[in-house]
Image: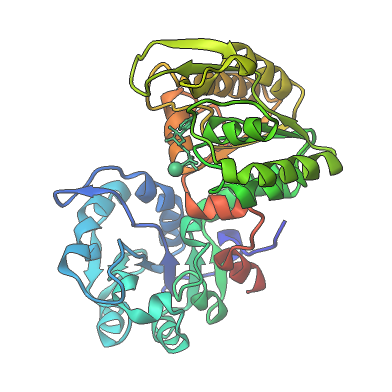
Amino acid sequence: MTQFKTLDDLGDVTGKVALVRVDLNVPMRDGDVTDDTRIRAFQPTVETLCEKGAKVLLLAHFGRPKGQKSSTQSLSMVVGEVEEVLGQEIMFVPEIAGDIVAQSIGIMRDGEVAILENSRFYPGEEANDAEFAKAIAANGDFYVNDAFSAAHRAHATTEGLAHLLPAYAGRAMEAELKALASALDNPEHPVAAVVGGAKVSSKLDVLTHLVSKVDHLIIGGGMANTFLAARGIDVGKSLCEHELTDTANDIMERADASGCTVHLPYDVVVAKKFEANAPSRTVNVHEVEVDDMILDLGASAAEALGDVLKTCRTLVWNGPLGAFETPPFDEATVALAKTAAALSKDGSLTSVAGGGDTVAALAHAGVTEDFSYISTAGGAFLEWMEGKDLPGVAALSDA
Ligand code: ADP
Ligand code: MG
Protein backbone atom coordinates (compact mmCIF):
# COMPACT_ATOMS: atom_id res chain seq x y z
CA MET A 1 0.00 0.00 0.00
CA THR A 2 1.18 3.47 -0.80
CA GLN A 3 2.60 5.28 2.19
CA PHE A 4 1.26 8.64 3.23
CA LYS A 5 1.16 10.77 6.36
CA THR A 6 -2.08 11.07 8.32
CA LEU A 7 -3.37 13.52 10.92
CA ASP A 8 -1.78 11.24 13.55
CA ASP A 9 1.63 12.36 12.26
CA LEU A 10 0.88 16.03 12.97
CA GLY A 11 2.84 17.58 15.83
CA ASP A 12 1.68 20.68 17.69
CA VAL A 13 -0.31 22.78 15.23
CA THR A 14 -1.68 25.39 17.63
CA GLY A 15 -2.18 28.60 15.66
CA LYS A 16 -0.96 26.99 12.43
CA VAL A 17 -3.00 27.38 9.23
CA ALA A 18 -4.28 24.15 7.64
CA LEU A 19 -5.27 24.24 3.96
CA VAL A 20 -7.75 21.39 3.70
CA ARG A 21 -9.03 20.12 0.33
CA VAL A 22 -12.54 18.76 0.79
CA ASP A 23 -15.46 17.77 -1.43
CA LEU A 24 -18.12 20.51 -1.37
CA ASN A 25 -19.51 19.66 -4.78
CA VAL A 26 -22.82 18.92 -3.08
CA PRO A 27 -26.20 18.50 -4.80
CA MET A 28 -28.28 21.70 -4.54
CA ARG A 29 -31.82 22.70 -5.40
CA ASP A 30 -33.15 26.28 -5.17
CA GLY A 31 -30.11 27.36 -3.17
CA ASP A 32 -30.39 24.54 -0.61
CA VAL A 33 -28.09 21.57 -0.14
CA THR A 34 -30.22 18.46 -0.73
CA ASP A 35 -27.73 15.85 0.55
CA ASP A 36 -25.05 16.55 3.17
CA THR A 37 -23.18 13.20 2.83
CA ARG A 38 -20.05 14.88 1.48
CA ILE A 39 -20.03 17.45 4.27
CA ARG A 40 -20.40 14.77 6.94
CA ALA A 41 -17.53 12.90 5.27
CA PHE A 42 -14.97 15.59 6.09
CA GLN A 43 -16.35 16.41 9.55
CA PRO A 44 -13.90 14.11 11.43
CA THR A 45 -10.93 15.75 9.70
CA VAL A 46 -12.05 19.29 10.51
CA GLU A 47 -12.89 18.36 14.11
CA THR A 48 -9.47 16.75 14.62
CA LEU A 49 -7.69 19.82 13.24
CA CYS A 50 -9.78 22.20 15.35
CA GLU A 51 -9.07 20.14 18.49
CA LYS A 52 -5.38 20.39 17.67
CA GLY A 53 -5.74 24.18 17.62
CA ALA A 54 -5.25 24.82 13.90
CA LYS A 55 -6.99 27.51 11.86
CA VAL A 56 -8.78 25.52 9.18
CA LEU A 57 -9.22 26.87 5.65
CA LEU A 58 -11.40 24.68 3.45
CA LEU A 59 -10.59 24.47 -0.26
CA ALA A 60 -13.04 22.96 -2.73
CA HIS A 61 -14.57 23.26 -6.18
CA PHE A 62 -18.24 23.53 -7.06
CA GLY A 63 -19.65 22.80 -10.52
CA ARG A 64 -17.81 23.69 -13.71
CA PRO A 65 -17.34 27.47 -13.80
CA LYS A 66 -14.37 26.99 -16.17
CA GLY A 67 -11.95 29.49 -14.63
CA GLN A 68 -14.44 32.36 -14.25
CA LYS A 69 -16.31 33.81 -11.32
CA SER A 70 -19.99 32.98 -11.41
CA SER A 71 -22.44 34.21 -8.78
CA THR A 72 -24.53 31.03 -9.02
CA GLN A 73 -21.56 28.80 -8.19
CA SER A 74 -20.04 30.60 -5.22
CA LEU A 75 -19.20 28.39 -2.25
CA SER A 76 -20.87 31.04 -0.07
CA MET A 77 -24.07 29.09 -0.80
CA VAL A 78 -22.96 26.07 1.23
CA VAL A 79 -21.73 27.92 4.34
CA GLY A 80 -25.03 27.56 6.22
CA GLU A 81 -25.20 23.81 5.68
CA VAL A 82 -21.55 23.30 6.69
CA GLU A 83 -22.19 25.35 9.87
CA GLU A 84 -25.14 23.12 10.65
CA VAL A 85 -23.18 19.88 10.20
CA LEU A 86 -20.06 21.05 12.04
CA GLY A 87 -22.03 22.88 14.73
CA GLN A 88 -19.86 25.97 14.62
CA GLU A 89 -19.78 29.36 12.97
CA ILE A 90 -17.84 29.50 9.72
CA MET A 91 -16.32 32.45 7.93
CA PHE A 92 -16.62 32.78 4.15
CA VAL A 93 -13.65 34.29 2.29
CA PRO A 94 -14.53 35.48 -1.24
CA GLU A 95 -11.03 34.70 -2.60
CA ILE A 96 -8.70 31.68 -2.56
CA ALA A 97 -5.34 33.49 -2.28
CA GLY A 98 -3.83 36.89 -1.57
CA ASP A 99 -4.33 39.64 1.02
CA ILE A 100 -8.03 39.03 1.66
CA VAL A 101 -7.23 35.48 2.75
CA ALA A 102 -4.27 36.68 4.86
CA GLN A 103 -6.45 39.31 6.59
CA SER A 104 -9.16 36.74 7.28
CA ILE A 105 -6.61 34.44 8.91
CA GLY A 106 -5.53 37.41 11.02
CA ILE A 107 -8.97 37.68 12.62
CA MET A 108 -9.57 33.91 13.00
CA ARG A 109 -8.99 32.30 16.40
CA ASP A 110 -7.35 28.91 16.84
CA GLY A 111 -9.85 26.10 16.13
CA GLU A 112 -11.95 28.26 13.79
CA VAL A 113 -12.94 27.32 10.24
CA ALA A 114 -13.26 29.32 7.02
CA ILE A 115 -14.37 28.34 3.51
CA LEU A 116 -12.40 29.89 0.64
CA GLU A 117 -14.03 30.64 -2.72
CA ASN A 118 -14.62 27.98 -5.41
CA SER A 119 -11.19 26.88 -6.67
CA ARG A 120 -12.51 26.51 -10.23
CA PHE A 121 -13.23 30.26 -10.43
CA TYR A 122 -9.49 30.53 -11.16
CA PRO A 123 -7.94 29.20 -14.38
CA GLY A 124 -4.83 28.14 -12.44
CA GLU A 125 -6.79 25.41 -10.65
CA GLU A 126 -7.47 23.03 -13.54
CA ALA A 127 -4.21 24.02 -15.26
CA ASN A 128 -2.38 23.02 -12.04
CA ASP A 129 -0.49 26.28 -12.46
CA ALA A 130 2.60 26.50 -10.23
CA GLU A 131 2.22 30.24 -9.49
CA PHE A 132 -1.43 29.81 -8.56
CA ALA A 133 -0.59 26.92 -6.22
CA LYS A 134 2.23 28.97 -4.66
CA ALA A 135 -0.14 31.89 -4.04
CA ILE A 136 -2.55 29.58 -2.17
CA ALA A 137 0.27 27.85 -0.29
CA ALA A 138 1.65 31.22 0.86
CA ASN A 139 -1.22 31.55 3.35
CA GLY A 140 -0.90 28.04 4.83
CA ASP A 141 1.47 26.06 7.03
CA PHE A 142 0.43 22.58 5.94
CA TYR A 143 -1.93 20.82 3.51
CA VAL A 144 -4.50 18.11 4.13
CA ASN A 145 -6.28 16.28 1.32
CA ASP A 146 -9.62 14.77 2.36
CA ALA A 147 -11.21 14.62 -1.10
CA PHE A 148 -10.56 11.19 -2.61
CA SER A 149 -13.38 11.92 -5.08
CA ALA A 150 -11.21 14.64 -6.70
CA ALA A 151 -7.93 12.70 -6.49
CA HIS A 152 -8.06 11.56 -10.13
CA ARG A 153 -7.55 15.20 -11.15
CA ALA A 154 -4.10 16.76 -11.13
CA HIS A 155 -5.30 20.24 -10.17
CA ALA A 156 -3.64 22.89 -8.01
CA THR A 157 -5.73 22.17 -4.89
CA THR A 158 -5.74 18.37 -5.37
CA GLU A 159 -2.14 17.80 -6.44
CA GLY A 160 0.01 20.93 -6.76
CA LEU A 161 -0.28 22.01 -3.11
CA ALA A 162 0.99 18.63 -1.87
CA HIS A 163 4.38 19.46 -3.38
CA LEU A 164 4.60 22.88 -1.75
CA LEU A 165 3.61 22.22 1.87
CA PRO A 166 3.89 19.31 4.31
CA ALA A 167 1.00 17.10 3.11
CA TYR A 168 -1.31 14.75 5.00
CA ALA A 169 -4.26 12.51 4.21
CA GLY A 170 -7.43 13.50 6.06
CA ARG A 171 -9.57 10.92 7.87
CA ALA A 172 -11.95 10.23 4.97
CA MET A 173 -9.07 9.93 2.50
CA GLU A 174 -7.26 7.62 4.88
CA ALA A 175 -10.32 5.38 5.31
CA GLU A 176 -10.93 5.26 1.56
CA LEU A 177 -7.32 4.36 0.74
CA LYS A 178 -7.24 1.66 3.40
CA ALA A 179 -10.50 0.12 2.18
CA LEU A 180 -9.41 0.16 -1.45
CA ALA A 181 -6.01 -1.34 -0.59
CA SER A 182 -7.69 -4.18 1.29
CA ALA A 183 -9.84 -4.90 -1.76
CA LEU A 184 -7.35 -4.93 -4.63
CA ASP A 185 -3.78 -3.95 -3.74
CA ASN A 186 -3.31 -6.43 -0.96
CA PRO A 187 -6.48 -8.51 -0.65
CA GLU A 188 -7.20 -11.81 1.00
CA HIS A 189 -7.87 -14.40 -1.71
CA PRO A 190 -10.03 -15.69 -3.24
CA VAL A 191 -11.16 -12.34 -4.62
CA ALA A 192 -14.38 -11.88 -6.62
CA ALA A 193 -15.23 -8.86 -8.74
CA VAL A 194 -18.76 -8.07 -9.83
CA VAL A 195 -18.83 -5.83 -12.88
CA GLY A 196 -22.19 -4.80 -14.28
CA GLY A 197 -23.83 -1.75 -15.74
CA ALA A 198 -24.89 -0.79 -19.18
CA LYS A 199 -21.91 -1.00 -21.50
CA VAL A 200 -18.65 -2.89 -21.97
CA SER A 201 -17.19 0.19 -23.67
CA SER A 202 -17.34 2.26 -20.45
CA LYS A 203 -15.63 -0.47 -18.41
CA LEU A 204 -12.99 -1.91 -20.77
CA ASP A 205 -10.06 -0.76 -18.66
CA VAL A 206 -11.77 -1.98 -15.50
CA LEU A 207 -12.32 -5.46 -16.95
CA THR A 208 -8.81 -5.72 -18.39
CA HIS A 209 -7.24 -4.71 -15.07
CA LEU A 210 -9.44 -6.97 -12.96
CA VAL A 211 -8.80 -10.20 -14.85
CA SER A 212 -5.15 -9.97 -13.80
CA LYS A 213 -6.06 -9.32 -10.16
CA VAL A 214 -9.08 -11.38 -9.15
CA ASP A 215 -9.95 -15.07 -8.98
CA HIS A 216 -13.58 -14.71 -10.07
CA LEU A 217 -14.98 -12.14 -12.49
CA ILE A 218 -18.76 -11.99 -12.37
CA ILE A 219 -20.19 -10.14 -15.35
CA GLY A 220 -23.76 -8.87 -15.26
CA GLY A 221 -25.89 -6.01 -16.53
CA GLY A 222 -26.16 -4.96 -20.13
CA MET A 223 -22.46 -5.66 -20.68
CA ALA A 224 -23.01 -9.38 -20.06
CA ASN A 225 -25.02 -9.40 -23.29
CA THR A 226 -21.92 -8.47 -25.28
CA PHE A 227 -20.02 -11.37 -23.68
CA LEU A 228 -22.91 -13.76 -24.38
CA ALA A 229 -22.99 -12.59 -28.01
CA ALA A 230 -19.23 -13.17 -28.19
CA ARG A 231 -19.92 -16.77 -27.18
CA GLY A 232 -22.34 -17.08 -30.10
CA ILE A 233 -25.57 -16.61 -28.15
CA ASP A 234 -28.41 -14.69 -29.80
CA VAL A 235 -29.35 -11.89 -27.39
CA GLY A 236 -32.32 -10.64 -29.44
CA LYS A 237 -33.07 -6.95 -28.96
CA SER A 238 -30.98 -6.65 -25.78
CA LEU A 239 -28.57 -3.79 -25.25
CA CYS A 240 -25.41 -5.23 -26.83
CA GLU A 241 -22.24 -3.79 -28.35
CA HIS A 242 -21.80 -6.22 -31.23
CA GLU A 243 -18.70 -4.37 -32.44
CA LEU A 244 -16.98 -5.30 -29.16
CA THR A 245 -17.37 -9.08 -29.30
CA ASP A 246 -13.68 -9.50 -30.27
CA THR A 247 -12.74 -7.37 -27.29
CA ALA A 248 -14.96 -9.48 -25.05
CA ASN A 249 -13.28 -12.66 -26.32
CA ASP A 250 -9.89 -11.09 -25.72
CA ILE A 251 -10.84 -10.30 -22.10
CA MET A 252 -12.02 -13.89 -21.61
CA GLU A 253 -8.72 -15.21 -23.02
CA ARG A 254 -6.71 -12.97 -20.72
CA ALA A 255 -8.79 -14.20 -17.80
CA ASP A 256 -8.03 -17.82 -18.74
CA ALA A 257 -4.34 -17.06 -19.00
CA SER A 258 -4.23 -15.54 -15.51
CA GLY A 259 -6.37 -18.15 -13.79
CA CYS A 260 -9.43 -15.94 -13.39
CA THR A 261 -12.81 -17.68 -13.77
CA VAL A 262 -15.34 -15.59 -15.72
CA HIS A 263 -18.97 -16.09 -14.68
CA LEU A 264 -21.61 -15.26 -17.27
CA PRO A 265 -25.33 -15.67 -16.61
CA TYR A 266 -27.01 -18.84 -17.88
CA ASP A 267 -30.53 -17.79 -17.02
CA VAL A 268 -31.84 -14.31 -17.61
CA VAL A 269 -35.01 -12.25 -17.24
CA VAL A 270 -36.38 -11.01 -20.55
CA ALA A 271 -39.22 -8.71 -21.59
CA LYS A 272 -40.58 -7.45 -24.91
CA LYS A 273 -40.89 -3.92 -23.50
CA PHE A 274 -38.49 -2.00 -21.28
CA GLU A 275 -40.93 -0.49 -18.80
CA ALA A 276 -41.93 -0.92 -15.17
CA ASN A 277 -43.79 -4.18 -14.51
CA ALA A 278 -43.80 -5.17 -18.19
CA PRO A 279 -44.64 -8.88 -18.61
CA SER A 280 -41.36 -10.78 -18.18
CA ARG A 281 -40.05 -14.37 -18.31
CA THR A 282 -37.02 -16.10 -16.90
CA VAL A 283 -35.35 -18.16 -19.64
CA ASN A 284 -32.12 -19.99 -20.38
CA VAL A 285 -29.77 -17.77 -22.40
CA HIS A 286 -30.29 -20.10 -25.38
CA GLU A 287 -34.04 -19.41 -25.35
CA VAL A 288 -33.94 -15.63 -25.81
CA GLU A 289 -36.34 -14.72 -28.65
CA VAL A 290 -35.51 -12.23 -31.42
CA ASP A 291 -37.79 -9.55 -29.93
CA ASP A 292 -36.69 -10.14 -26.29
CA MET A 293 -34.59 -7.77 -24.20
CA ILE A 294 -32.42 -9.20 -21.41
CA LEU A 295 -33.00 -6.87 -18.44
CA ASP A 296 -31.75 -8.86 -15.45
CA LEU A 297 -30.06 -12.09 -14.42
CA GLY A 298 -32.33 -14.98 -13.50
CA ALA A 299 -32.88 -16.15 -9.94
CA SER A 300 -30.81 -19.34 -10.32
CA ALA A 301 -27.90 -17.42 -11.83
CA ALA A 302 -28.05 -14.98 -8.89
CA GLU A 303 -28.11 -17.87 -6.43
CA ALA A 304 -25.15 -19.59 -8.10
CA LEU A 305 -23.22 -16.31 -7.94
CA GLY A 306 -24.06 -16.07 -4.24
CA ASP A 307 -22.47 -19.52 -3.83
CA VAL A 308 -19.32 -18.20 -5.53
CA LEU A 309 -19.19 -15.32 -3.02
CA LYS A 310 -19.47 -17.83 -0.17
CA THR A 311 -16.10 -19.29 -1.23
CA CYS A 312 -14.44 -15.84 -1.40
CA ARG A 313 -12.76 -13.60 1.19
CA THR A 314 -12.88 -10.34 -0.78
CA LEU A 315 -15.39 -8.69 -3.12
CA VAL A 316 -15.18 -5.56 -5.27
CA TRP A 317 -18.41 -4.50 -6.94
CA ASN A 318 -19.08 -1.93 -9.65
CA GLY A 319 -22.24 -1.89 -11.74
CA PRO A 320 -25.73 -3.28 -11.18
CA LEU A 321 -26.62 -6.76 -12.54
CA GLY A 322 -29.79 -5.54 -14.21
CA ALA A 323 -31.86 -2.48 -15.04
CA PHE A 324 -32.50 -2.07 -11.30
CA GLU A 325 -34.32 1.28 -11.58
CA THR A 326 -37.22 -0.47 -13.33
CA PRO A 327 -39.02 -3.16 -11.32
CA PRO A 328 -38.90 -6.16 -11.40
CA PHE A 329 -35.45 -5.99 -13.06
CA ASP A 330 -33.81 -5.16 -9.73
CA GLU A 331 -34.19 -8.64 -8.27
CA ALA A 332 -30.81 -10.23 -9.09
CA THR A 333 -28.92 -7.13 -7.93
CA VAL A 334 -30.88 -7.05 -4.67
CA ALA A 335 -30.46 -10.81 -4.09
CA LEU A 336 -26.69 -10.86 -4.66
CA ALA A 337 -26.23 -7.63 -2.66
CA LYS A 338 -28.07 -9.22 0.29
CA THR A 339 -25.88 -12.34 0.13
CA ALA A 340 -22.73 -10.19 0.04
CA ALA A 341 -24.03 -8.08 2.95
CA ALA A 342 -24.79 -11.16 5.08
CA LEU A 343 -21.32 -12.62 4.41
CA SER A 344 -19.73 -9.27 5.28
CA LYS A 345 -21.71 -9.03 8.49
CA ASP A 346 -20.55 -12.55 9.43
CA GLY A 347 -16.98 -11.41 8.87
CA SER A 348 -16.19 -13.93 6.13
CA LEU A 349 -16.11 -11.36 3.32
CA THR A 350 -14.53 -7.92 2.89
CA SER A 351 -16.84 -6.11 0.48
CA VAL A 352 -15.99 -2.86 -1.27
CA ALA A 353 -18.30 -1.23 -3.80
CA GLY A 354 -18.49 2.03 -5.73
CA GLY A 355 -19.93 3.82 -8.76
CA GLY A 356 -22.81 6.27 -9.04
CA ASP A 357 -25.54 3.82 -9.99
CA THR A 358 -24.01 1.06 -7.87
CA VAL A 359 -24.29 3.16 -4.72
CA ALA A 360 -27.95 3.81 -5.57
CA ALA A 361 -28.59 0.12 -6.32
CA LEU A 362 -27.02 -1.03 -3.04
CA ALA A 363 -28.99 1.59 -1.12
CA HIS A 364 -32.13 0.31 -2.85
CA ALA A 365 -31.17 -3.21 -1.67
CA GLY A 366 -30.82 -1.85 1.87
CA VAL A 367 -27.26 -3.11 2.35
CA THR A 368 -25.35 0.17 2.68
CA GLU A 369 -24.62 -0.41 6.38
CA ASP A 370 -23.46 -4.01 6.00
CA PHE A 371 -20.95 -3.70 3.18
CA SER A 372 -17.41 -3.19 4.48
CA TYR A 373 -16.98 0.00 2.47
CA ILE A 374 -19.01 1.85 -0.14
CA SER A 375 -17.16 4.54 -2.06
CA THR A 376 -19.16 7.54 -3.27
CA ALA A 377 -16.21 8.79 -5.30
CA GLY A 378 -17.51 8.06 -8.81
CA GLY A 379 -14.79 8.85 -11.36
CA ALA A 380 -11.91 8.43 -8.90
CA PHE A 381 -13.25 5.02 -7.82
CA LEU A 382 -13.49 3.82 -11.43
CA GLU A 383 -9.96 5.00 -12.23
CA TRP A 384 -8.75 3.14 -9.16
CA MET A 385 -10.58 0.02 -10.42
CA GLU A 386 -8.75 0.51 -13.71
CA GLY A 387 -5.46 0.25 -11.82
CA LYS A 388 -4.53 3.86 -12.58
CA ASP A 389 -2.35 5.97 -10.30
CA LEU A 390 -4.44 8.83 -8.94
CA PRO A 391 -2.40 12.07 -9.03
CA GLY A 392 -3.85 13.38 -5.76
CA VAL A 393 -2.95 10.15 -3.96
CA ALA A 394 0.47 9.84 -5.60
CA ALA A 395 1.32 13.41 -4.52
CA LEU A 396 0.48 12.53 -0.90
CA SER A 397 2.79 9.54 -0.91
CA ASP A 398 5.61 11.50 -2.57
CA ALA A 399 5.29 14.25 0.00
P1 ADP B 1 -22.09 2.81 -12.21
O1 ADP B 1 -22.67 4.21 -12.30
O2 ADP B 1 -22.31 2.20 -10.85
O3 ADP B 1 -20.64 2.76 -12.65
P2 ADP B 1 -23.14 2.08 -14.80
O4 ADP B 1 -23.40 3.52 -15.07
O5 ADP B 1 -22.05 1.42 -15.54
O6 ADP B 1 -22.92 1.87 -13.21
O7 ADP B 1 -24.43 1.22 -15.11
C1 ADP B 1 -25.70 1.44 -14.55
C2 ADP B 1 -26.80 1.34 -15.57
O8 ADP B 1 -26.79 0.09 -16.25
C3 ADP B 1 -28.13 1.42 -14.88
O9 ADP B 1 -28.78 2.59 -15.33
C4 ADP B 1 -28.88 0.17 -15.32
O10 ADP B 1 -30.23 0.40 -15.61
C5 ADP B 1 -28.14 -0.22 -16.58
N1 ADP B 1 -28.31 -1.64 -16.90
C6 ADP B 1 -27.95 -2.69 -16.16
N2 ADP B 1 -28.32 -3.85 -16.75
C7 ADP B 1 -28.93 -3.52 -17.91
C8 ADP B 1 -29.54 -4.27 -18.98
N3 ADP B 1 -29.57 -5.61 -18.95
N4 ADP B 1 -30.06 -3.58 -20.01
C9 ADP B 1 -30.02 -2.23 -20.01
N5 ADP B 1 -29.48 -1.46 -19.06
C10 ADP B 1 -28.93 -2.10 -18.01
MG1 MG C 1 -23.41 5.31 -14.00
Instruction: Confirm whether residue 119 shows in the render.
Output: yes
Q: Quadrant of the C terminus?
A: bottom right
Vertical position of residue 196 compared to residue 85: above or below = above
Q: Nearer the viewer, residue 28 or 229?
A: 229
Q: What residue do we see at 53% from left, 48% from top?
A: 202
Task: Locate residue 99, reporting x and y percent.
Answer: 27, 87
Give residue 124's position: percent from left, percent from top: 39, 81
Picture coordinates of residue 246, whole percent (x, y): 69, 45
Q: Residue furthest front?
A: 290
Placement of the N terminus among the 4 image quadrants? bottom right
Residue drawn at (53%, 36%), measured in percent from left and top? 240
- Toward which corner of the image does residue 190 lie, by quadrant? top right
Q: Position of residue 320 (x, y in %)?
A: 51, 31
Residue appearing at x 53%, y 11% in the figure: 282
| 260 lies left or right of 349 | right
As displayed, is residue 364 above or below residue 140? Answer: above
In the displayed structure image, the side of residue 152 where residue 285 appears, left or right: right
Residue 385 in the image: above or below residue 222: below
Q: How many numbered circles does the render carry?
A: 0
Left or right? Give the position of 8 relative to 57.
right
Q: State how the image is colored.
A: rainbow
Taking depth in this image into account, of 350 and 388 the one nearest to the observer is: 388
Residue at 40%, 76% (x, y): give it.
125
Q: Nearer the viewer, residue 376 or 3?
A: 376
Q: Quadrant of residue 301?
A: top right
Asked whether, in this view, residue 374 is left or right of residue 62, the answer is right
Q: Is residue 372 visible?
A: no
